[in-house]
Amino acid sequence: GQVVGILLPTNNSQVLSAIENLVNSNPYKVGSGKIIVVEFLDPECPYCALFSHEYSNLLNQLIENGTITYEVYYFPTHVVGYYQEGNSTAFTYGVANWLIITHVWSGNPQAGLQLLEGAYNIAFNYLIQAQQATSQQEAMVLFNDYPIAQYNYLSTYYPINITMSTALEIVDNASNNVMNVLQSLNLPQQMYGTPLLQQ
């Protein structure tokens, strides 16, 4: 398989400026390739977990051989679902998971990427179990439990506790930032979602 991104028109100076600002302002990157792959993601996103399962080996290969620079932005679309459903535990653990990954990433990008992939691997295994569940209730329990399982794994590297109000502020700021970026790139509203890849 191959990573498929969205190719933007290069004759639009506004879009080119937005891409340049996007790349230059992002601390969560790894690799040194001339091709930059930007992914807007949520560690709690099941589709991101499926994408990681399918393409993480390819991404790592392209990073290691110097083909791409890989960058991630927080787009907490799925963690918000836990909050909307009243699952404050999964919500706060989900936001804490992002904070742990990026804390490690800031000091060691390769280690941060490995933690992200490890979190996705946990989610993927839970999703497989949910698919095999004998009832919808059993499947939902598994879906609600994997942010906690991810946190138990990630917190061995850097434990962190956050309050609901802090988590809501982080999610709100991240969502607003990403929406502003995507609008500056002239991407249509119906394309907003995770994982959104920009190549």
Image (spheres, rainbow, N blue to C red):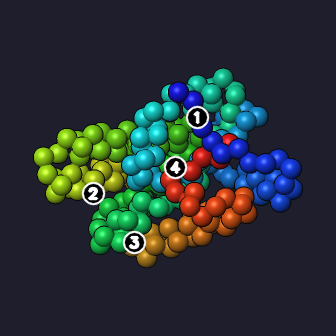
Left or right of residue 186: residue 102: left
C-alpha span from label 2 to label 1: 29 Å
Q: State the residue position of label 1.
A: 3
Mark 4 against mark 2, which lies toward the viewer?
A: 4
Which numbered disc, 1 or 3, marks the residue that appears first in the sequence? 1
**Quick check: marks 4 and 2 in contact, CB under 8 Å?**
no
Please report the residue visible at 50 percent of the width from the left and 33 percent of the height from the top.
Answer: 56
Q: Is residue 100 above or below residue 76?
A: above
At numbered mark 1, what does the secondary structure look like: helix, strand or loop?
Answer: loop
Amino acid at pointer 3: Thr
Query: Is residue 156 at all visible to an observer of this figure?
Result: no
Q: Position of residue 23 (x, y in %)?
A: 73, 50
C-alpha span from label 1 to label 4: 12 Å
Left or right of residue 163: residue 175: right
Which numbered disc, 3 or 2, marks the residue that appears first in the sequence? 2
**Quick check: marks 4 and 3 in contact, CB under 8 Å?**
no
Q: Position of residue 90 (x, y in %)?
A: 32, 61
At numbered mark 3, what does the secondary structure look like: helix, strand or loop?
Answer: loop
Q: State the residue position of label 3.
A: 163
Q: Which mark is residue 195?
A: 4
Please report the residue visible at 64 percent of the width from the left and 61 percent of the height from the top.
Answer: 188
Q: State the residue position of label 2.
A: 144
Q: How many circles with numbers are drawn on the protein?
A: 4
